[in-house]
């Protein structure tokens, strides 16, 4: 499929891309190649091909959900400048 100057103007306007007059022919040729590539891909017989999320059949290794750090709640609250009811108090930033 060949893309002409009017299609390039329309596409560039929709994409909000400035295409100079001397670049229109070049852009049209490149867009035509892209459309031709899509046409080739569309022509491939994919009957019976199962869709996949990833090209490699791999399982993601997950770590065990274990607690690795001890509770430091009291220690951290002890060094905080201001605490009330187990909450950190901070200066008001919005009036």
Image (tube, grey):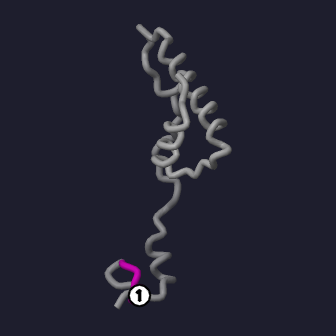
User: Measured from the top left, where is residue 32 in percent x and y?
Assistant: 58, 28
Quarter occupied by residue 31: top right
The residue under the point 42% across, 8% down is 47
The residue under the point 45% across, 11% down is 46
Q: Can residue 58 be seen in this view?
A: no
- Examine the structure image and report whether residue 39 is included in the region drawn in magenta: no
Q: Give the residues in magenta.
A: 87-93
The quadrant in which the C terminus is found is bottom left
| Numbered marks: total | 1
User: Measured from the top left, where is residue 89 in percent x and y?
Assistant: 39, 85
Q: Is residue 13 visible?
A: yes
The residue under the point 52% across, 32% down is 60
Q: Is residue 43 above or below residue 69?
A: above
User: Measured from the top left, where is residue 82 in percent x and y?
Assistant: 43, 88
State the SS at label 1: loop
Q: In this view, does 8 lie above or below 52?
A: below
Main SS, magenta residues: loop
Q: What crowding class fits label 1: few (fewer than 14 Cα within 10 Å), some (14-19), or many (20 or more)?
A: few
User: Measured from the top left, where is residue 12 in percent x and y?
Assistant: 52, 46
- Examine the structure image and report whether residue 89 is included in the region drawn in magenta: yes
The residue under the point 66% across, 36% down is 26
Toward the viewer: 9 or 60? 9
Q: Is residue 43 left or right of residue 25?
A: left
Q: Mark 1 points at which residue?
A: 93
Toward the viewer: 56 or 2? 2
Q: In this view, does 50 lie above or below 24?
A: above
């Amino acid at each position: 499929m060949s893309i002409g100057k009017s299609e390039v103007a329309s596409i560039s306007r929709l994409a909000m891309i400035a295409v100079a007059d001397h670049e229109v022919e070049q852009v049209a040729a490149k867009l035509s190649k892209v459309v031709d590539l899509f046409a080739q891909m569309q022509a491939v017989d994919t009957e019976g091909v199962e869709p996949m999320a990833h090209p490699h059949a791999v399982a993601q290794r997950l770590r065990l959900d274990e607690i690795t750090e001890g509770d430091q709640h009291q220690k951290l609250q002890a060094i905080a400048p201001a605490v009330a009811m187990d909450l950190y108090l901070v200066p008001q930033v919005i009036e």
